[in-house]
Image (tube, rainbow, N blue to C red):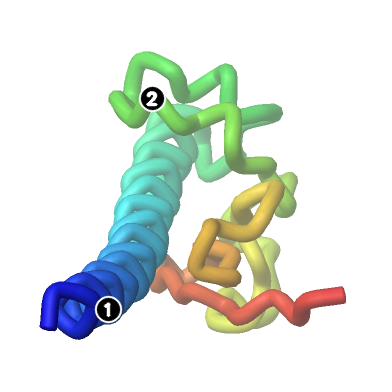
């Protein structure tokens, strides 16, 4: 009887651990998406203040974006916002590495953000 109870508790703990791991992965995805959106907005503010030109790097917007994860992203677009032919498909910035959930946060030049699945090797 005691062995059955112990096995039952182990199964419950295992299932709870799996559920928690999924939650942590999803939380990481949400944080990355929020950071990408905040950084993209900071890039648009920078461009407004600099005749439509995008910042030369993400360090230039450090006073505009309060996210502590700025270094986890890289700027992918340059030049002037008005010169971008298709803002809905042009990546403005992206996360350097995938989140624990297997996604990469991406912000586009039109302001929308997505979590793109990254294939596992």
Number of the front mark, 2 or 1: 1
Q: Which residue lies furthest to the front in this view?
A: 1
Quarter in which the N terminus is drawn: bottom left
Report how far apart the C-alphas of labels 2 and 1 lie in the structure: 43 Å
Quarter in which the C terminus is drawn: bottom right
Picture residue at 62% right of the left edge, 55% below the top: 94
Name the residue nearer the viewer: 20 or 110.
20
Please say if 47 is above or below 27.
above
Image x and y of residue 108, in percent: 54, 68
Mark carried by residue 68 = 2
Q: In this image, 30 relative to 58: left or right? A: left
Q: How crowded is mark 2: few (under 14 residues within 10 Å), some or many (20 or more)?
A: few
Picture residue at 52% right of the left edge, 44% below the top: 52
Mark carried by residue 7 = 1
Q: In which quarter of the image is residue 53?
A: top right
Image x and y of residue 71, in percent: 58, 28
Picture residue at 21% right of the left edge, 71% below the top: 6
Among the two numbered marks 2 and 1 on one chain, the one whose residue lies closer to the N terminus: 1
Please say if 77 is above or below 70.
below
Q: In this image, 82 relative to 121: left or right? A: left
């Amino acid at each position: 009887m005691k062995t059955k109870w112990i096995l039952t508790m182990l199964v419950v703990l295992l299932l709870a651990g799996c559920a928690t791991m999924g939650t942590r992965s999803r939380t990481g995805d949400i944080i990355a998406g929020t950071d990408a959106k905040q950084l993209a907005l900071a890039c648009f503010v920078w461009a407004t203040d600099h005749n439509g030109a995008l910042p030369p790097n993400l360090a230039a917007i450090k006073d505009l974006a309060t996210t502590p994860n700025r270094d986890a992203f890289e700027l992918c677009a340059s030049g002037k916002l008005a010169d971008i032919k298709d803002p809905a498909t042009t990546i403005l910035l992206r996360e350097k590495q995938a989140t624990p959930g297997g996604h990469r946060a991406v912000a586009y030049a039109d302001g929308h953000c997505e979590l793109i699945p990254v294939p596992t090797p």
